[in-house]
Image (cartoon, helix red, strand yellow):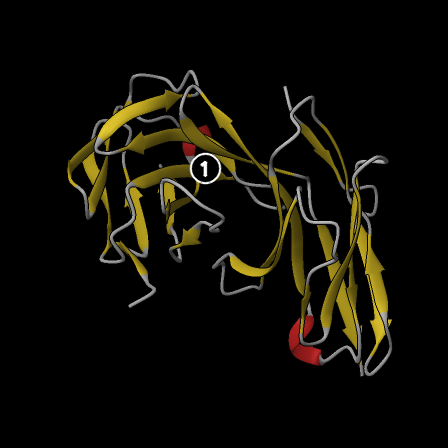
Amino acid sequence: AQTVTQSQPEMSVQEAETVTLSCTYDTSESDYYLFWYKQPPSRQMILVIRQEAYKQQNATENRFSVNFQKAAKSFSLKISDSQLGDAAMYFCAYRSFQGGSEKLVFGKGTKLTVNP
Amino acid sequence: DTEVTQTPKHLVMGMTNKKSLKCEQHMGHRAMYWYKQKAKKPPELMFVYSYEKLSINESVPSRFSPECPNSSLLNLHLHALQPEDSALYLCASSRREGNTEAFFGQGTRLTVV
């Protein structure tokens, strides 16, 4: 079974600085997708960025970028120019196909605090 | 419309009550999901519907009964719940194929008393 590991329960960053959140995963599949979701106190899970496993190029969305190392099964998220609104729980997620249907597996999350 | 709408936002129910959670999306997504999330924990998958058919049941107790009446609606019927079932229940949807993410609703905060 696929597993996703986030080794940093909590992280903090100064406003305008850069922070990197770590994620590793375990899978025997060759084709899959990886996601970072953000969950602020408002509870809604919001997609931050996604990465296709077959693409070597790292995904980028404005201030958010990933470092995808397929051989190492690593998928870290870099947040540049951190803003107060970035404070939230961040979940790394893996999407697999099981039995013909989609299944999203989450890591335990990293709580990010942004200090003014 | 990129929203997944869940009702109610909050629900308090007794252990002998029967209630239902509702989820609706109009994005044409054919996969819909129920997740349970306890405080400070990641979401845990409960059920997956694909093309209105139940495709994954993660060994959820029978006091939770999902229903997918059509491609836009997903219900979760609750009966004889226990206090430990208190949690945030999240609904999500995604396209069946392709590189697309799951869109989540804001959840229903359920308290069982």
Disc 1 on helix, strand or loop? strand
Q: Quadrant of residue B14?
A: top left
Quarter holding the N terminus of chain B is bottom left
Residue under the point 40% across and 28% down = A101
Image-based side of B86 in relation to A57, left or right = left
Q: Nearer the viewer, residue B29 or A47?
A: B29
Residue under the point 82% across and 49% down = A22
Can residue A78 be seen from the camera position used here? yes
Q: Amino acid at mark 1?
A: Lys
Q: Residues within 10 Å of mark 1 (few under 14, many from 20)?
A: many
Image-based side of A111 in relation to B1, left or right = right
Q: Chain of mark 1?
A: B
Whether A68 is drawn above or below A29: the answer is: below
Identify the residue position indicated by label 1 in the image. Answer: B36
Q: Quadrant of residue A82?
A: bottom right
Can residue B112 be seen from the camera position used here? no
Q: Position of residue B112 (x, y in %)?
A: 36, 37
Q: Position of residue B20 (x, y in %)?
A: 20, 39
Q: Nearer the viewer, residue A33 or B76?
A: A33
Residue under the point 83% across and 47% down = A8
Whether A64 is drawn above or below B78: the answer is: below
Residue under the point 80% across and 84% down = A116
